[in-house]
Image: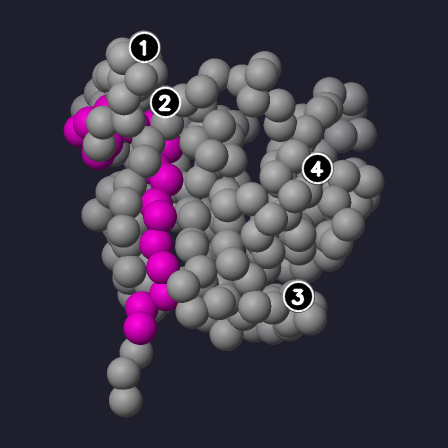
């Protein structure tokens, strides 16, 4: 990374051949249906957007607040817009691409002042059975529990304790964020869990499906929620 590169940036688009199968990006990209219309909130420099368009055949609309990241993302994805996601009309610019089959918000909502407002805005842009994929850092991860017990609550440049995070989440509060915004959580995946990685590796070796999330509130560094819009009846 050069000095002029944005904070959240990868020099190349995501490549599953060079990534651990259980890291967050790998989990997220396996959840994206091929040839789907994707609205990506906080697309950074487009390292996931580019993969979805080039390798999955998706049509991606990316929204990003960092202008430097936007400039790079526009070389990787056909439609990227510079947007402050805390604005009341942040999603208006994405209306022309609706309805979207997928709403992807990977490691972005914790940076926003009002993430619930953005999630509520998104409803009108989604197909009735759209999949909503949200990843959030887990403040209840075991290592942070030990630090907090020792009286340490130190912010850093990256990770769960990123100094730019405005919200801290657990399994419970992450689920509540989605449900209060009108979504139904269907499944939870995790990343950064040693227990989960061992279990997943064993499942792959035996050609079986991976097991459900193992002690996610304690063992997961990142929480990945799968949800859909709630069906409202009148």
Q: For this view, does 127 lie left or right of residue 62?
A: left
Q: Which mark is residue 205?
A: 1
Q: Tell me the mark number nearer the camera, choosing from 3 and 1.
A: 1
Q: Which of 32 and 151 is in front in this view?
A: 32
Q: Does the magenta stretch include residue 214?
A: yes
Say which label, 3 or 1, has the lower sequence index.
3
Other-residue count near label 1 (Cα within 10 Å), few / some / many at <14 / 14–19 / ≥20: few
Taking depth in this image into account, of 129 and 6 the one nearest to the observer is 129
Whichever of labels 3 and 4 marks the residue nearer the N terminus, that label is 4
Q: Are marks 1 and 4 in contact (CB under 8 Å)?
A: no
Query: What residue is drawn where x is 59% and y is 15%?
Result: 18
Q: Can residue 153 be seen in this view?
A: no
Image point (27%, 17%), residue name: 203
SS class of the residue under badge 2? loop
How many residues crowd mark 2 within 10 Å: few (<14), some (14–19), many (20+)?
Answer: some
Count all numbered tags in the image, as a single digit: 4
Give me the residue at 36% from left, 59% from top. 228
Q: Name the residue under label 3.
A: 97
Q: Give the range drawn in magenta.
A: 213-231
Point out the tag, 2 or 3, that comes first from the N-terminus.
3
Q: Earlier in the sequence, mark 1 or mark 4?
A: 4
Residue underneath mark 4: 54
Q: How far separated are the C-alphas under marks 1 and 4?
A: 29 Å
- For the question of whether residue 18 can be seen, the reply is yes
């Amino acid at each position: 990374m050069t000095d002029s590169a944005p904070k959240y940036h990868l020099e190349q688009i995501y490549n599953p051949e060079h990534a651990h199968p259980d890291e967050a990006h790998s989990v997220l990209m396996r959840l994206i249906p091929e040839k789907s219309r994707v609205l990506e909130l906080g697309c950074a420099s487009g390292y996931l957007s580019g993969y979805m368009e080039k390798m999955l055949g998706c049509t991606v609309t990316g929204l990003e607040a960092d202008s430097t990241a936007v400039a790079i993302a526009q070389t990787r994805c056909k439609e990227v817009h510079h947007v402050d996601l805390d604005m009341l009309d942040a999603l208006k610019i994405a209306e022309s691409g609706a309805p979207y089959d997928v709403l992807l918000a990977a490691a972005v909502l914790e940076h926003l002042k009002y993430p619930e407002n953005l999630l509520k805005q998104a409803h009108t842009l989604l197909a009735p059975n759209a999949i909503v994929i949200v990843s959030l850092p887990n403040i209840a991860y075991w290592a942070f529990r030990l630090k907090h017990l020792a009286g340490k609550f130190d912010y850093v440049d990256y990770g769960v304790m990123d100094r730019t995070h405005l919200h801290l989440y657990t399994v419970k509060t992450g689920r509540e964020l989605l449900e209060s915004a009108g979504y139904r959580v269907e499944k939870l995946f995790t990343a950064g869990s040693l227990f989960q990685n061992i279990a997943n590796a064993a499942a792959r070796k035996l050609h079986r499906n991976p097991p459900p999330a193992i002690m996610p509130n304690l063992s997961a560094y990142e929480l990945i929620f799968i949800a859909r819009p709630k069906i409202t009846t009148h």
